[in-house]
Image (spheres, grey):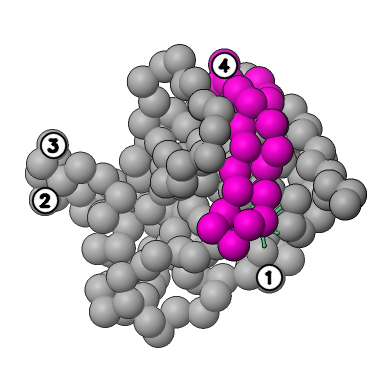
């Protein structure tokens, strides 16, 4: 279980994004955070990822998990090609050059970006960028994968294909997935554990 215990997050501008929020998230399942914009979903995901500090409260992750995340800002390296952007996701000390190339190719093929491996990130469309970011997250073979509105720049066909791919990979590899979306159709498709966020009334 991932235990979110009594988390409050107040930003420097005085906005309280989460107010004494607690939640249990099962491991090895697909959890969806659903709700309208501004209700603290991204804030909680960033706190679980460990890139944001709560004002108070803690997140308890029992297993020593390898975490990958895919945030709305994809953080691709603009002047670097797709191949190296994807390879950036893994610890390169533990793998040969040939092994790394094969791994990148394998994950790229699965996601359908094997033909753009030599393109620089800055030349890519929004949908291509999201697929590269997904490949970079998956190549790490995470135990915990956090995705924030990760597929929303894709056209409908690719979005459906990648959603199904993500579900089948999760079923096979049994990583813990936390997926943030405001799209109810996508939420129901992905969720085994559905968490609805509501906007606080003033
Ligand atoms: P959601 O993901 O549900 O859209 P967020 O966690 O992004 O919600 O935002 C919750 C609230 O916190 C919003 O009112 C938002 O404006 C505010 N907020 C989010 N990030 C920051 C930040 N870095 N600085 C200040 N306020 C923020």
Q: Mark 2 points at which residue?
A: 97
**Horizontal and vertical percent for residue 171?**
59, 28
Q: Please tell me in which quadrant of the rendered image residue 170 appears.
A: top right
Mark nearer the N terminus (1 vs 2): 2
Q: Is residue 108 left or right of residue 154?
A: left
Which is nearer the eye, 133 or 112? 133
Which is nearer the eye, 131 or 21? 21
Q: Is residue 182 left or right of residue 81?
A: right
Mark nearer the N terminus (2 vs 4): 4
Please give the name of the residue rendered at 81% of the width and 38% of the height, measured from the top-left corner.
196
Q: Is residue 35 left or right of residue 11?
A: right
Mark 1 close to ligand 1, CB under 8 Å:
no
C-alpha span from label 1 to label 2: 34 Å
Which contiguous range is marked in magenta? Answer: 1-24
Q: Mark 3 points at which residue?
A: 94
Asked if the stretch drawn in magenta spans residue 193, the answer is no
C-alpha span from label 3 to label 1: 36 Å
Q: Mark 1 points at which residue?
A: 155
Please give the name of the residue rendered at 45% of the width and 79% of the height, measured from the top-left corner.
124
**Horizontal and vertical percent for residue 197?**
79, 42
Mark nearer the N terminus (4 vs 3): 4
**Horizontal and vertical percent for residue 51?**
42, 46
Mark 4: secondary structure: loop
Vertical relation: 158 (above or below) 193: below
Q: Name the residue under label 4.
A: 1
Mark nearer the N terminus (4 vs 1): 4
Please give the name of the residue rendered at 51% of the width and 46% of the height, measured from the top-left corner.
46
Comparing labels 4 and 1, the label whose residue is closer to the camera: 4
Mark 3: secondary structure: helix
């Amino acid at each position: 279980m991932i235990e979110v215990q009594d988390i409050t997050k107040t930003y420097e501008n005085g906005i309280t994004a989460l107010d004494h929020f607690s939640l249990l998230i099962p491991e090895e399942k697909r959890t969806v955070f659903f709700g309208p914009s501004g209700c603290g979903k991204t804030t909680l995901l960033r706190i679980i990822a460990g890139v944001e500090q709560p004002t108070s409260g803690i997140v308890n992750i029992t297993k020593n998990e390898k975490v990958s995340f895919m945030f709305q800002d994809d953080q691709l390296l603009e002047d670097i090609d797709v191949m190296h952007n994807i390879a950036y996701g893994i610890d390169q000390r533990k793998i040969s050059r040939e092994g790394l190339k094969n791994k990148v190719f394998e994950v790229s093929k699965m996601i359908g970006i094997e033909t753009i491996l030599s393109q620089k990130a800055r030349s890519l469309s929004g949908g291509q960028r999201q697929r590269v970011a997904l490949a970079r997250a998956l190549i790490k073979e995470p135990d915990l994968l956090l995705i924030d509105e990760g597929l929303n720049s894709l056209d409908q066909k690719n979005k459906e294909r990648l959603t199904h791919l993500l579900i089948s990979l999760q079923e096979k590899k049994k990583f813990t997935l936390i997926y943030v979306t405001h799209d109810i159709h996508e939420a129901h498709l992905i969720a085994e554990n559905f968490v609805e966020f509501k906007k606080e009334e003033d």
